[in-house]
């Protein structure tokens, strides 16, 4: 019996050593091998030499117009050199340490060479000879290792397909194949490796991408449907009149968006289904008050709530804002962080366990083994992208499947939200409180810094405050601090006795950090020089200037977060980016920041420029790495796949649900933990 689950060892030429080498590429079975798709195709195009940028990788086709000469030098080093002609242009080609290519270079014959173009020397640094194929031909290019070469892999795939192609069965519903005119699975797999032409390769890819996204979405939607069906969450029957009364005591009228998301969350609280909701809202959109309302709601139903934040400063700040909003006689709130003193900690833990505490705010200290809640009903994590999935998991395990709300200011573009958070419900605050003036953003180069400092005097003289952010130097925390200290000293000299400059950095003790923040809030200092520790959530409405040094070192989402620290009061605010970007992309990124204050737009652009892995970090964000599909470029396919998968699960399409249920269980995902903890 042959099946795609056979080991690659059945193929001729695959002995133990090669088997091992293939396994290191993730290829164990025949199925792995035939679905090990090329990541791109060598498109043999005749490019005009003048069109090629310096150091660009290209394939050039032409006639060999000189004998290939092999020059040996040094120990075991050699260079193969010859000239090629394209139209009437002659250029030289050299290959290093690939002497065996000499036989492939025949005077007067056409060849295609892949390599890196050196514009100055008008020479191609050859990497590979592709033979002379017609321009329509594609050479598949695979990710390979030293031990497994392209040619070996192609040969093995060819053999495997010959032996096993009858074993490749369709795995998509016929209705969808017809509806979207998709290639059948067998043809698509073959065409992925050996496309006849450009068009065929595109069709094959469309099918394979659809399959990848659809199966993924079937799993996501399947799990979501299952979770919804299991009525084992808790029903938080909050006290409506008390909640209404509380909302009336707020110092401002909620925005419509805040009202809407509060309703959505409250509906989930009441329902016996387990809530897993993502609350997205740009910086300053007012998520904290929404958190306060729903925590209060849980309390009126006799449940405890936990609010988890990434930093101690933020924990402290949340405690303050909650205490201000709540009547202290009615709601008992405490904060627990790594620096809570032993005695106080013991007290808090006791009160938590016997139900005397209603709400606990804290960092990951909240989830240590000895922390027990009497009746945990709701868990909220703020800036959730900073939390490890495991941490959230442990916290949730402390209660009886409490409802969970993830709040994030990182504007996750829709593309990502529906992949990474496909199993969650999403609420969006898409409106800022009235009266906010958009932050004006300017990009300057280093030499202009002096004039900006001069300008800052004007803002400071109005009684406003300013943040100065120093870049994080990843390689070295010491360098990081040194850098921040230098800027701090420079500014101290600059502002002299007129304004107080304070310094905040990651190496400081928590108590010290709190004190510095406190002083800044109380306007005892006017200028706060800081590494990115203030990035998340700090609320000092009187600060109107955000000056970011070496801004090109930050991600756009991060810059946007930092910018969100100003423009929180009613005054015009400014964000100044100091940067001398080294390339086009850097310039582009600075421009985007100056052109929009909409976090979603910023994030979308960042995604386009850098790709999801760079922007969010796969591990942190839980965004799956697809093999063929690209969630940005293939977004349309992703949307269609999702809506079809959703239909199957929501419309009681029993037949397909049954067909895919085992698949839903077994579908491979990079890191299972990332999704359904
Ligand atoms: P974020 O969503 O970034 O966490 P915050 O919750 O910190 O935003 O809110 C930012 C500021 O806006 C706070 O000072 C808060 O008191 C204020 N705020 C929140 N909602 C409103 C509202 N509806 N009207 C006016 N101000 C509001
Ligand atoms: Mg916040």
Image: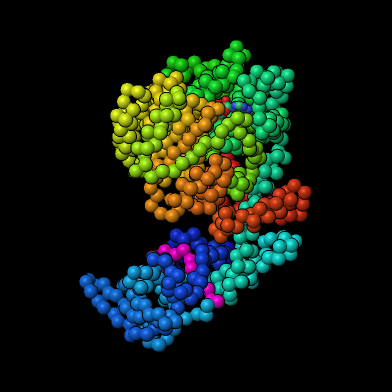
Q: Going 23% across and 74% down the picture, which residue do you hit?
A: 73
Q: Residue at x 31, y 25 (%)?
A: 496
Residue 275 belongs to the span the image colors magenta: no
Q: In the displayed image of the protein, which residue is found farthest to the top?
A: 329
User: Which of the two residues, 16 or 219, is positioned nearer the viewer here?
Assistant: 219
Camera sees residue 126:
yes
**Residue 187, horizontal then vertical, whole percent:** 63, 71
Residue at coordinates 60% horizontally, 17% vertically from top-left? 326
Could you tell whether 544 is left or right of 237 in the image? left
How many marks are shown on the rendered structure? Answer: 0
Which of 430/73 is in front? 430
Can you give x and y, in whole percent of width and height, for residue 572 in the image? 52, 31
Q: Is residue 142 magenta?
A: yes
The residue segment tinted magenta is 136-150
**Type of colouring:** rainbow
Q: Is residue 657 left or right of residue 407?
A: right
Q: Is residue 574 above or below residue 417?
A: above
Residue 545: x and y in percent read: 45, 32
């Amino acid at each position: 019996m042959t099946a795609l689950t056979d080991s690659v060892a059945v193929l001729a030429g695959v002995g133990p050593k090669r088997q091992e080498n293939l396994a290191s590429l993730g290829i164990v079975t025949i199925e792995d091998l035939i679905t090990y798709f090329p990541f791109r195709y060598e498109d043999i195009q005749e490019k005009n030499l003048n069109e090629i940028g310096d150091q660009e990788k290209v394939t050039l086709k032409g006639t060999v117009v000189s004998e290939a000469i092999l020059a040996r030098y040094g120990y075991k080093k050699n260079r193969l050199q010859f000239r090629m002609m394209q139209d009437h242009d002659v250029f030289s080609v050299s290959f290093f340490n690939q002497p065996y290519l000499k036989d492939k270079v025949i005077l007067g014959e056409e060849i295609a060479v892949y390599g890196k173009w050196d514009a100055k020397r008008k020479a191609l640094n050859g990497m590979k000879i592709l033979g002379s194929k017609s321009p329509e031909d594609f050479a598949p290019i695979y990710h390979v290792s030293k031990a497994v070469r392209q040619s070996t892999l192609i040969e093995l795939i060819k053999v495997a397909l010959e032996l096993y192609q009858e074993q490749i069965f369709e795995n998509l519903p016929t209705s969808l194949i017809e509806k979207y005119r998709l290639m059948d699975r067998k043809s698509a797999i073959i065409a992925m490796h050996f496309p006849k032409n450009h068009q065929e390769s595109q069709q094959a890819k469309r099918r394979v991408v659809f399959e990848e996204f659809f199966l993924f979405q079937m799993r996501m939607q399947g799990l979501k449907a299952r979770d919804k069906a299991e009525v084992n969450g808790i029903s938080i029957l909050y006290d409506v009149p008390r909640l209404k009364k509380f909302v009336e005591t707020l110092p401002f009228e909620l925005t419509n968006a805040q009202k809407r998301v509060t309703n959505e969350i409250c509906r989930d609280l009441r329902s016996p289904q387990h809530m897993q909701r993502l609350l997205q809202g740009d910086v300053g959109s007012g998520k904290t008050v929404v958190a306060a309302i729903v925590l209060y709601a849980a309390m009126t139903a006799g449940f405890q709530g936990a609010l988890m934040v990434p930093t101690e400063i933020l924990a402290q700040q949340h405690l303050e804002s909650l205490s201000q909003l709540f009547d202290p006689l009615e709601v008992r709130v405490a904060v627990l962080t790594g620096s809570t003193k032993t005695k106080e900690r013991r007290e808090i833990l006791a009160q938590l366990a016997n139900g005397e505490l209603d709400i606990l705010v804290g960092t990951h200290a909240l989830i240590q083994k000895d922390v027990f809640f009497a009746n945990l009903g709701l868990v909220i994590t703020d800036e959730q992208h900073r939390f490890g999935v495991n941490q959230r998991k442990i916290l949730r395990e402390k209660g009886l499947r409490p409802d969970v709300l993830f709040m994030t200011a990182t504007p996750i573009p829709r593309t990502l939200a529906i992949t990474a958070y496909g199993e969650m419900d999403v609420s969006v605050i898409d409106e800022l409180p009235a009266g906010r003036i958009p932050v004006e953003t300017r990009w300057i180069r280093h030499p202009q810094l002096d004039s900006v400092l001069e300008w800052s005097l004007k803002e400071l003289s109005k009684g406003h405050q300013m943040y100065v952010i120093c870049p994080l130097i990843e390689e070295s925390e010491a360098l990081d601090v040194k850098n921040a200290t230098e800027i701090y000293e420079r500014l101290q000299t600059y502002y002299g006795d007129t304004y107080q400059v304070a310094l905040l950095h990651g190496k400081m003790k928590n108590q010290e950090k709190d004190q510095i923040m406190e002083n800044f809030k109380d306007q005892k200092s006017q200028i706060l020089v800081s590494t990115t520790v203030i990035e998340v959530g700090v609320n000092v409405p009187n600060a109107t200037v955000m000056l970011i040094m070496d801004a090109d070192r930050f991600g756009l989402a991060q810059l946007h977060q930092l910018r969100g620290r100003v423009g929180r009061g009613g005054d015009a605010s400014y964000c100044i980016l100091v940067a001398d970007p080294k390339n086009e992309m850097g310039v582009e990124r600075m421009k985007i920041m100056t052109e929009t204050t909409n976090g979603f737009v910023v994030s979308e652009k960042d995604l386009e420029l850098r790709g999801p892995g760079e922007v969010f970090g796969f591990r942190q964000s839980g965004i799956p790495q697809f093999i063929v599909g690209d969630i940005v470029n293939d977004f349309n396919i992703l949307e269609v796949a999702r809506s079809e998968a959703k239909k199957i699960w929501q419309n009681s399409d029993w037949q397909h649900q049954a067909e895919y249920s085992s698949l839903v269980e077994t579908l491979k995902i990079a890191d299972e933990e990332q999704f359904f903890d």
